[in-house]
Amino acid sequence: MVATAKQFALDHPDVGIDWEARSLSEFGEVHADHLAETYDLVVLDHPYVGTLAASRSFLALDEHLSADLLRRHDADSTGPSHASYEIDGHQWALAIDAAAQVTGYRSELLEREGVRVPQSWDEVLTLGRIRRGFVSLPLLPLDAFLAFCSICANAGEAPFSVENVPLSRATAEYALDMLQRLRECSVGQALQENPIAIWERMSTTDGTAYCPLAFGYSNYSRPGYRDHSLTFGLIPSAGHGPTGATLGGAGLAVSAHCAHRDVALAYVAWVASPECQSTLYVDAGGQPGSRAAWTSDHANAITGGYFRATLPVLEHAWLRPRHGSFPSFQAMGAEIVAGFLQRKISLADAVDELIDQAGACIPE
């Protein structure tokens, strides 16, 4: 974003854009009114779009950008990234970053053990028996909860996908049991790791060779970024293909308090355009939201093929509900899954609590 701001200022000498960074944990929270009062432009997470829509603290972009431009962005979307910022008939941000939970591994470490990249969850567990930590995944509470949701979706029944059944008991039991098995073969500190932590460890040490499910960061497949480049690809299948990974990413929104709306809107439209996303944005280390960038030869050449290898996961990703009550379910669900993985609550109790919380999350 700093690189895009510099280029925009060069092209528009009377404009200055200064970015301030939030931590990853702060990005996963929402303080819509405060952010909109403080900043003209905000990079935000799509599960909070319902809250943003209710507050009207950010501009509905469809009221300010042309319908043709928004249709082109929708057609160029990586999976449901563009749609993830739409609710109540309005577009609240443009997708500038696309991500989902993907598989990452050190190919030379797998080859050293004479094993292949797992295709199924049973194969993942078999790989995990090579030694403790050879297979590992990040299990901080929120990451563990999203892994739980993804495993449910991968098994064919995503949360809130069946009318009046926000969470299937059988699928929830399967997903929690699988998550506990994965926790048992993961490194001891897995409960304190987020995706960046595991990719950092895998790219700088040789203890972990394979992670089946964590939000992908293309930087780690760029030659020279770390001591060892990681290879990324499709998540394991429970019989339905590499489907159901939780969609992540980021969108760029404009505060309703912005005093220079035309300039801000022009900047948003340019940053999200295929032209910027396929060149400056990806060259500066970004992970674009534009499908044209994900399929471009250039973007794949500089990232070891990251984008083409993981695109099918993005195209079949699970889009979390974006209504106002979902963030509270996500927060409570993270606590429940964490308690289960720490063996503080039983499988049956964890499932009961998750089903109760999911039921309370259904909007009226």
Image (spheres, rainbow, N blue to C red):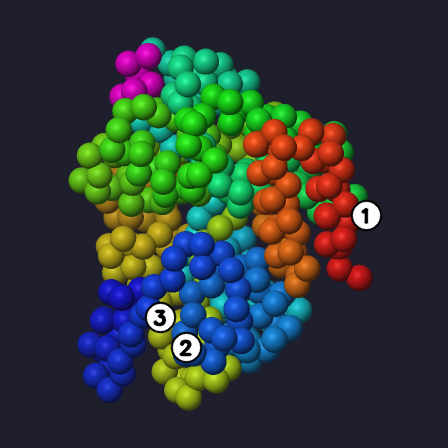
Magenta span covers which residues? 107-113
Q: Secondary structure at mark 2?
A: loop
Ranked by sequence position, the earlier of labels 1 and 2 is: 2
Question: Would you identify the image quadrant in which residue 221 lies?
Answer: top left
The residue that label 1 is drawn on is: 164
Q: Residue at x 33, y 44 (%)?
A: 218
| Residue 254 in picture, x, y percent from top left | 46, 76
The residue that label 2 is drawn on is: 39
Q: Quadrant of the C terminus?
A: bottom right
Question: Would you identify the image quadrant in which residue 308 lies?
Answer: top left
Q: How far apart in space, not on screen, are marks 1 and 2 (Cα)?
A: 39 Å
Q: Residues within 10 Å of mark 2 (few under 14, many from 20)?
A: some
Q: How far apart in space, not on screen, are marks 3 and 2 (Cα)?
A: 19 Å
Marks 1,3: beta carbons within 8 A: no
Q: Residues within 10 Å of mark 3 (few under 14, many from 20)?
A: some
The residue that label 3 is drawn on is: 270
User: Observer-nearest residue: 97 or 273?
Assistant: 97
Circle 3 or circle 2, nearest the eye: 2
